[in-house]
Amino acid sequence: MLCMELTRNGNKVTLATLKGPLSEATRNCQENGVELLTFPYMMGQFSPAFAKAIPELCKKHEVIHGHGLWLHVNWVTGSSARRFNKPLVISPRGSLIPQRLEHSYWKKKIADFVFDRKNLEYASCLHATSTQEYESIRYYGLNNPVAIIPNGVKIQVFDKHILKQKLIDKHPKLKDKKIILYLSRISWEKGLPLLAEAWANVSADFKNWHLLIGGQGPQKYENEIKKLFSEKGLSERVTWAGLLLGEEKLSALALAELFVLPTLSENFGIAIAEALSTGIPVITTQGAPWPDLIEWECGWWIPIDASHLANALREALALPDSVRQEMGENGKRLIQSKYTWEQVASQMTAVYDWIIRKDKPPHCVKID
């Protein structure tokens, strides 16, 4: 979506990525003027074809924007920008958050020493999606200018009454229930053990509420989490829907009256923004950069522990429907005010222009 909006802003954009199933957003980009180049890869996302093509692409473009760290494609992109003295923007996408760095620590340490640190220090500007991610970049020891620009959200317009039935037909336990929705990856950083403990604490007092969990992750971890919920006696109070895409995802959002993401670590939290954009109040932790939930009165932003999560759930479920609906409308206004792709692309275009012209930085850039 960013590439498409950048093109609409008058930029010529080339998106270079590895081969695989194209997302709807990627197809839309291609249909709206973005040049899409895909390259085959081998194990570990190592791509000789990508490495061969990127230097020539770098020579032809004014600004190179790399997304992520620790992978072959990131190393090739950064080294090519350095080779041809091209301005480089890097979006770490949460890779420098301390909790993320602890996983595969030594592999990342070696990759940093051999490849990534050179690219990071060379970058004309780094991109953080939140103030919390900006702080993690500084904590990592990087002094580059940092543009703080959130991810954008595509505002979904759909008929909730029609779409609700799609998941109900597939999962009859959802019928006539008020739905709490978790919709994200099933992985260690998402805090699902906290949700299991909190829901076990609260669910007996709210018989008409049901927890719907959408997402997938490593099979071993999924099995462990499902076993944990089962051991807490929650088998009849939770539905595991697996990966939800397209209309099934919209059906889950249409059903939900409350969204929960008890995350340990997020650089942004796109699932939170998507829920808010469809009018669902949100409970999330301070592991996600969403103090807006408090300021805009559209959710709960709580410390990372099961007791606070249980208290927030209890408070949210006890509210009258009209109050939750009002909070949902507040969330919609928040997204439309700050998080549309048009706004994000406008800020990113200003960053590119500043890098090329070397004039006064835009307001979103922090130099200190």
Image: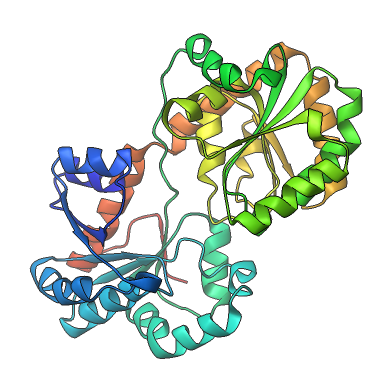
Vertical relation: 167 (above or below) 267:
above
Colour mode?
rainbow
Residue 328 percent across, percent down from the top left: 60, 23
Q: Quadrant of residue 59?
A: bottom left
Residue 28: give x, y in percent of width and height: 24, 38
- Visible residue check, residue 308: no
* Depth order, front residue of 136/309: 309
Residue occupying the point 19% across, 75% down: 86
Q: Which quadrant would residue 126 be assigned to in this image?
A: bottom left
- Relative to the observer, which residue lies in front, 126 or 313? 313
Q: Which of 17 and 66 lies nearest the eye of the viewer? A: 17
Spot occupied by residue 180 in the image (x, y as percentages of width and height): 70, 28
Q: Residue at coordinates 81% horizontally, 48% vertically from top-left?
A: 228
Res. 78 visible in picture: yes
Q: Is residue 123 left or right of residue 254?
A: left
Horizontal side, residue 53 vs residue 70: left or right: left
User: Which quarter of the picture shows residue 38?
Assistant: bottom left
